[in-house]
Amino acid sequence: MKYCKLLFLEEIDSTNNYAKTHISDIDDKTVVYTNKQTNGRGRFDRKWIDLGNENLYLSIVLKPSENLKSTYCNMTQYASLKLSETFDEYGVESFIKWPNDILINNKKISGILAESVIKSGYMQGIVLGIGINLNSKTNDLAKINKAATSLNIEIQNKVDKNKFLDKFTEKFFRDYDKFLVNGFLYIKDDYIKKINFIGKEITITNMDNNITGIAECVTDTGAIIINNQEFYTGDITF
Ligand code: BT5
């Protein structure tokens, strides 16, 4: 693994919690991962369900310099593109459900939780938490409150977890420095190919507000335009 450092924990409440608490002791470009996550989190205090130790639960710790902070808000988009490109290598077509899910056959296979760590008004870094279903049982997936899938089911074969981690981290870090400097524009064309709702009517839910309209485009800074308004966060349905 030449692209990043790895920090393995056998069991932890949440790799994001661990990375945030210990951020001062963790180097830039470190991937914290675990076999068992007892209290995995999604956005807005939702849960990320642990489906066993053959799946991936990881947090990438990033500490870019102050002058590159404007790219922070596009980090989830960058990670989702690199994840989707990793799935390509397994011969399955995946889509990015903006802003933070990866879907295969309309079922969620991966989710991303990006959190900034700010101490005394100073940004210490960003923790990109990612859950990826690699080897899960259909029965366990059925217990999740939304349609979910796992790579072993899609390719009808067991997935080597370490190989997947290797492929993903290589993809993520190979382009990361260029992405930091150039921002969303650097990935815009590739990103747009991986989303499937431009030109369709979508509803975006943002802080309990629903806005419905045609998703017009993605801007050079990664926002979605609906009804002439820019959105960087929210949940979409279409
Ligand atoms: C996310 O939130 O999708 C972000 C999930 C991030 C999880 C990783 S695991 C490593 C790191 N440490 C953490 O504590 N978290 C990160 P959100 O968009 O809010 O989606 C949450 C929803 O996804 C839940 O309410 C369920 O509907 C669904 N879900 C939960 N577990 C799932 C799973 N294993 N597979 C597919 N869908 C799941």
Image (cartoon, grey):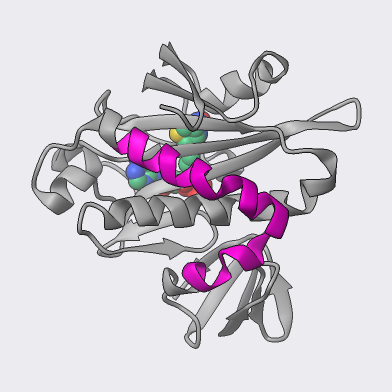
The reply to whether the magenta stretch includes residue 54 is no
Residue beneath the point at 66% across and 38% down: 115
Percent x, y for residue 166? 35, 34
Q: Is 174 left or right of 179, judged from the image as shown?
A: left
Q: Quadrant of the N terminus?
A: top left
- Asked if residue 126 can be seen in this view, the reply is yes
In the rendered image, the vertical position of residue 171 relative to residue 169, given as above or below: below
* Residue 104, image x, y percentages: 28, 60
**Looking at the image, residue 232 lies above or below residue 216:** above
Total residue callouts: 0
Left or right side of 162 for 9 = right
Image point (49%, 33%), residue name? 3
Q: Nearer the viewer, residue 49 or 181?
A: 181
Q: Quadrant of ligand 1?
A: top left
Tell me where residue 132 sits by quadrant.
top left
Region of the chain picked out in magenta, as a range: 164-191
x%, y% of residue 227? Answer: 68, 86
Residue 171 is inside the magenta segment: yes
Query: Could you tell me if residue 147 is visible in this image?
Result: no
